[in-house]
Amino acid sequence: ELGDAQRHEPTGDILLKFLLKLGPSSVLPLILPGLQDANARAYTRQLIVQMVDSYQRHHKTDLLPDIVNLFKQAVVLLEARTALRELLTHELAHVSLPALINGLQEQLLMEDCTLSLVELVKPPNRQQEVLEAVLQALRNRHKQRGAHITLVRCGHLATERVCSLLTDNDKTMTEEAR
């Protein structure tokens, strides 16, 4: 089936068909070797972007949580993890924030989500949006630890926003700010 499809359709369309047929949890882990391999990395990143866009268009479902969950399976694939972070902070930066914030609640995702959020906060035009999302996550007990780590790693970019928590009526937030 794949051989016939490759002769008539671009690879991205083939992957999308498998994605729609088998679901993201079956298909997405198969692309990790492409992110690990320096020769295939750029093309694989392009395919992932196409799949995210097509899946949203055809299935009306956000594929980003599944993309973020790939960090769990790429734990020993350092180049793949780096490529995923770059993908989420560059090509998919405009849509990745909610999935990265949600990833703060899972221990296996926290480090890569934190590193990604620190990168997302660097462009001046994104700082307010990203910091506000992280501060909101700080109010969620499941995401609090990851949000705290993210704010610390944001350093001076988050200082003003964190200091404003010192006057917050929520005692938990005041403690977190200290």
Image (spheres, grey):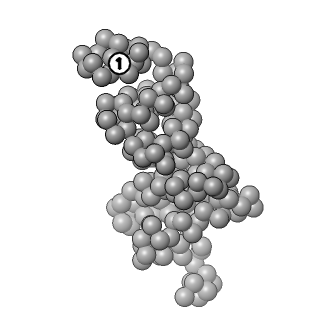
Give the tally of numbered discs.
Answer: 1
Residue at figure coordinates x 40%, y 60% from the top left: 56
Residue indicated by mark 1:
175
Give coordinates of residue 152: x percent, y percent. 51, 25
Q: Residues within 10 Å of mark 1 (few under 14, many from 20)?
A: few
Seen from this angle, which residue lies furthest right?
Answer: 39
Q: Is residue 35 left or right of residue 169?
A: right
Give coordinates of residue 15: x percent, y percent. 53, 72
The quadrant the C terminus occupies is top left
Residue at figure coordinates x 31%, y 35% from the top left: 140
The residue lying toward the viewer, choosing from 112 and 20, is 112
Tag 1: amino acid: Glu
Mark 1: which secondary structure? helix
Height in image: 12 above or below 42?
below
The residue lying toward the viewer, choosing from 129 and 84, is 84
Residue at figure coordinates x 54%, y 28% from the top left: 153
The quadrant the N terminus occupies is bottom right
